[in-house]
Amino acid sequence: MAKKDKAHVSETPATAVLRAAKAVFSEHPYEYLEHGGAQHSAAVLGHDPFAVVKTLVMQDQDAKPLIVLMHGNRTVSTKNLARQIGAKSVEPCKPEVAQRHSGYQVGGTSPFGTRREMPVFIESTILDLPRILINGGRRGYLVGIDPQLCVQLLGARPVQCALAE
């Protein structure tokens, strides 16, 4: 009997969504580091942090949640984002609020399979990449996908709000 592939990680709501959509994805488990972020996972996996995408749960002035997909080595200009989406202001959610909206533990948030449906905004330059690594629904687990899946499966709208870190 063949041994199970060690790189396979048990199903998450995110991978269930990807499988249901018959999306092609690769699995990239790594040793999670508290507050290590996308920079850490990129370094451990040997990838450019520009191609490792963070899933950020934010909220507008009315506390309506939204998701922003951003390069691992960039931050979000909340002013530019607010202007582009027609909001007065945008700010990151507190970790416990983000967890309640997404259903995922902070550090393991995927835009796929969230508990609550939220509008998704993607930094436009991410869509120019051939492949990205994005959280697969748990800490220490990224999936490699075509960034166009974010538009096709999530209805992600391109924005330009990246700031160099």
Image (cartoon, rainbow, N blue to C red):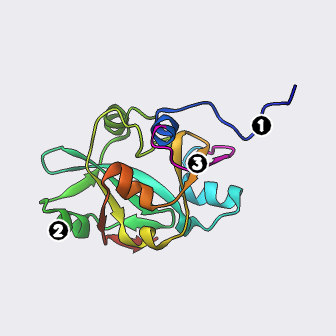
Camera-side residue of 27 and 49: 27
Q: SS of the residue at dot 3? A: strand
Which residue position is annotated with label 3? 142
What distance separates the C-alpha of mark 3 from that of mark 1?
A: 16 Å
Which residue position is annotated with label 2? 83
Q: How many marks?
A: 3
Q: Is residue 102 above or below residue 152?
A: above
Does residue 36 appear anywhere in the picture? no
Which residue position is annotated with label 1? 5
Q: Is residue 127 above or below residue 120?
A: below
CA neighbours of label 1 inside 10 A, class few (<14), some (14 to 19), many (20+): few
Mark 3 or mark 2, whichever is nearer to me: 3
What distance separates the C-alpha of mark 3 from that of mark 2?
A: 31 Å
Give the residue displayed 62% in from the left and 54% down from the top: 41
What's under tag 3, amino acid-wise? Leu
Per the rendered image, the range of residues in magenta is 20-33
Camera-side residue of 87 and 159: 159
Q: SS of the residue at dot 2? A: helix
